[in-house]
Structures are given as structure tokens and as C-alpha cells.
Image (cartoon, grey):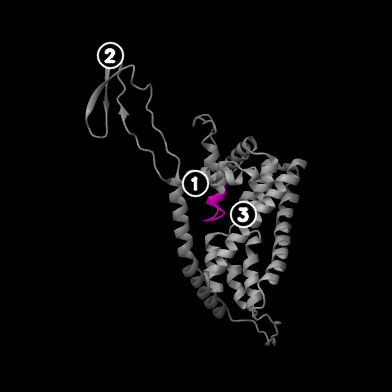
Amino acid sequence: VPAVMATRTIESPKSRLVTMLIIPFMSCSARIPVFVILISAFFPRHQGLMMFSLYVGGILVAILMSKLLNRFLGDKGDYPFVMELPPYRFPAWRTVLRHTWEKGRQYLQKMGGIILISSVCIWALCYFPRPSTEAEVVVPTAESESTENIKVATPSNHAHEVSIADAPTQPAVTQPVSYLERIGSTIAPVFQPLGFDWQMTVGILAGVGAKELVVSTLSVMYAKDAPTVEADETVVANDEAAEDEEMRLSGLLRGKATSAAALAYLVFILCYFPCIATLIAIKNESGSWKWAALAATYTTLTAYVLAWLVHTFIGPLL
């Protein structure tokens, strides 16, 4: 977001617009946790090389797309940037602090609201709907085990008798999948050519709001299929909990995905849909929603094509 807002210093409208549209290809700090988890899980012997390759790959894609955008955007008043440099002096600390406060407050006022709203929306999609118990079975005690009938209490506060043979052996509480899981399961076939399962698809959807949500979403999605560990079996210190969670997620990913799919997923996360805050920044700096929509569309299409190429041609070599 700060990089997009900094493009206002570029005099040429065309150069400023192209710069805004290629900034999403640069690896931001929010993508690093995703890179670290997948690289450590599938490419442990080449972690440094893989991380460096992703950074360089993003730069190369940005250069290529800048060439294409400069060709197709046409003439938008592009002209050389010429400015007479004034004599520079060391600023007073009071001036630095005042400008820092003003720019920081402006940034928070513009972006803080949309980041909060998008985060709440993603959380709601992940959290709802919550499970509801249709009927709670009153389990008979040892003294009444010989009875033929038991009572079932329903939400309407009425009790009726059912046969012990018809009564469930344990409370059947069905936890419905979240709205985000439903959406991910629906569009999962679109990502099958890339080797992504529905859990990875849900992670992609969560990353639209903020890329930081990808790792936590993957952890929740894959943990549902993992065996539960009793609380008294393992006790870890608070400072080791995060590392333990990271190792657990890496193990789950290795059991569910292939190296080809993991590499394609890395490429897709590198290039796809900018986060909501970045789109708002592009809209504010360009003055039109169409450029924000273009950034969201062409980056996602580019990510899909590159991920498919990686999965199809490079994946078999791994």
C-alpha cells in the first residue's frame, strides 16, 4: 500500500499508472509466511534458492508486464521527467516528526477502515454458520439402563419417548462447513488443473482480504482431517507453540499435496489478486475503479497461467 501511494511522486501519468499495476507482483511481507511454510515442507534442501527464485520471479514478471502495459495503454501524456534539484538541507527533527505524524495519520484514515472491514468479512465467512444442536439426548444413568425407553428433549421444550434401539449411541452434532468452505468447494474444480485441492482453494480465497490469512486458513482446513492429540500427551512451552504449529502444518501439507502442486501454489500466491487494501490504494491514486478492477483481473489471470505452466512442465521434473 505505501508503494502504491508513493507513485504520486511520478510526473508522467502513464508511468505512474503502469507502476501501480505492476507493484502487486513484488513480494510483500504478508506472503513470506506462506513461502516459508511450503518451502520448508516440500523443498527443505533448497530453501534459500527457492525463496530467492520467488523474489526474482516476481521482479521478472513485473518487468514483462510493464512492457506489455506500456504497449497497450497507449499515449497518456508520457514525457521525460525533468526537475531541477533544489539545495538539500538536513531537516529539523520537529519538521520530520510533524510530517511523519501527518502522513501516518492520513494512511491510517484511508486504509485502516477498509482493512478492518475486509478482515471482519473474511472472519465472518470463516466463522459462520455455527453448529446448532437440533436435539440433545438425555443419556440414561446406570440405574435406568434397564429401561426400554429414554426421553429426548427438543428445542421446543417438549419431551417424547423413543425406543432405546432408535436412540443414538452418542450425541450427533453436525458441524456445518463455513460459508468460505462452501465457496471453496464449489470453485475447486477450476483449480484442479493446477493441482490444488479444495483446502488450498479456500486458502486462496482467504488471501483476497489479506495474504496473512492464507497460512492460518490452511492450518484450520487441514487440521479438520488430522487426528486429534490429547491435551495431556504433549506439553509445549508458549515460545515453542508457534514452531510446533508450523511443523504440524508442514506435515499435513506433505501428506495432502504434491511438490508440483506446492510449487504451483507458491507461484500463484506470488502473482494473484492484490489484497483489498492495495486495490483501494490503486483506486484512490488512479481516480477510477476500472484500474483497480484491471489490477485484480490481470494479476489473477497471470497467476493462473504461470501456475499451470509450472505444474504442467516443471512439476514432473521434481
Of the residues under marks 1 and 3, which one precedes in the sequence?
A: 3
| Image quarter (top left, top right, bottom left or bottom right) of the N terminus | bottom right
Rendered location of residue 223, percent (x, y): 53, 37
The relative height of residue 99 versus residue 202 in the rendered view (above or below) is below
Q: CA distance from mark 1 to mark 2?
A: 45 Å
Of the residues under marks 1 and 2, which one precedes in the sequence?
A: 2
Name the amino acid, label 2.
Glu
Residue furthest out toward the right: 317
Label 1: which residue?
183
Secondary structure category for the residue under label 1: helix
Marks 2 and 3 in Cβ contact (< 8 Å): no
Name the amino acid, label 1.
Ile
Q: Which residues are drawn in magenta?
A: 204-216
Rendered location of residue 263, percent (x, y): 69, 46
The residue that appears at 67% across and 80% down in the rendered structure is 78
Task: Please tell me which residue lies in front, 201 or 192.
Answer: 192
User: Mark 1 Cα within 10 Å, few/some/many (few <14, many 20+)?
Assistant: some
Q: CA distance from mark 1 to mark 3?
A: 23 Å
The relative height of residue 179 versus residue 93 in the rendered view (above or below) is above
Q: Quadrant of residue 285?
A: bottom right
Label 3: which residue?
31
Marks 1 and 2 in Cβ contact (< 8 Å): no
Residue 215 in the magenta stretch? The answer is: yes
Label 2: which residue?
148
Closer to the observer: label 2 or label 3? 2
Q: Quadrant of residue 38?
A: top right
Describe residue 141's horizontal placement relative to residue 23 as left or right. Answer: left
Task: Please tell me which residue lies in front, 231 or 150.
Answer: 150
